Amino acid sequence: MGAESIVLSGGYEDDEDHGSFILYTGHGGRDGSTGMQIADQEFTRLNKTLLANVTSGQPVRVMRKVATGFRYDGLYSVDDAYDLLGKSGFRICRYELNEVASTTAGTAMTAPGRPAARAESTTSRIVRDTARSRRVKSLHHYMCQVCGVRLETKNGDYAEGAHIRPLGRPHDGPDDESNILCLCPNHHVQLDKGGLYITDDFQVHARDGAPMGPLTLVTGHVIDVAHVGHLRGQFGF
């Protein structure tokens, strides 16, 4: 099912706590005396458990360290997870958490107590189908720009409009055609989860660096190279 709770105690240098939005660092590889990262993290053990929350939609309870102990601050959805190079040059497991509305929060508590209030929440991966996305897919005749596959269904051809630089915090990608690719569902997921990356000359590579061929480009669809650069930086490529 996934993790039930996390604690924000200021122990990891790559953590960013913005209140309703959290960039959370996974477990392991930290020097306990300095707080600096001294080894790579992997999606194993506790990190693998929290990773399961992304696909299951199960929220986590967030506890923040305060002067008197720990305070329960509500439920947060684990919306994304990936690895990237941290501030000290080691790979870290990064999770993006957003506060779930209408939760009982702000309750002071001391370890090892647990909050009594619980709530259920479900999340789903949203594939946006805006006018801009539809135009990009139409320009490519619904053929994936990575593999060239066009999916045929009883309701017509199918492809997904994939944002290169993600929308919303912390990436703040624009919802315009320069930031949208026409992809099949498989390559959309790989793009979103760091399974592939794109170079500035629009060559596609697998996560391990293996070439996958050029990104298909067509007249009328201009991709901003800054967005593919941001994508590589997001996952540490």
Image (cartoon, rainbow, N blue to C red):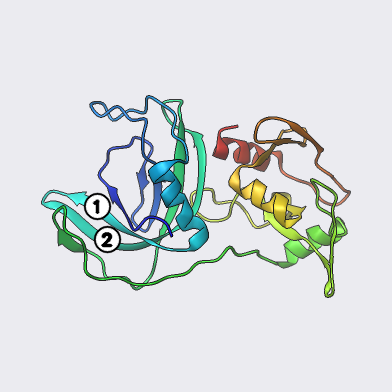
Amino acid type, label 1: Arg
Count of numbered circles in the view: 2
The secondary element bearing badge 2 is classed as strand
Q: Residue furthest left?
A: 68
Q: Nearer the viewer, residue 70 or 41?
A: 41
Q: Is residue 136 placed above or below 41 in the rendered structure?
A: below
Amino acid type, label 2: Asp
Q: Look at the image and tell me whether residue 25 can be seen.
A: no
Residue at 59% x, 51% y: name it.
Answer: 166
Q: Are marks 1 and 2 in contact (CB under 8 Å)?
A: yes
- Crowding at dot 1, Cα within 10 Å, few <14 / some 14-19 / many 20+, comes out as some
x and y, in percent, of residue 124 in the image: 55, 66
Residue at 55% x, 51% y: name it.
Answer: 172
x and y, in percent, of residue 26 in the image: 39, 41
Q: Is residue 15 left or right of residue 143?
A: left
| Marker disc for residue 64 | 1
**Quadrant of the image containing the C terminus:** top right
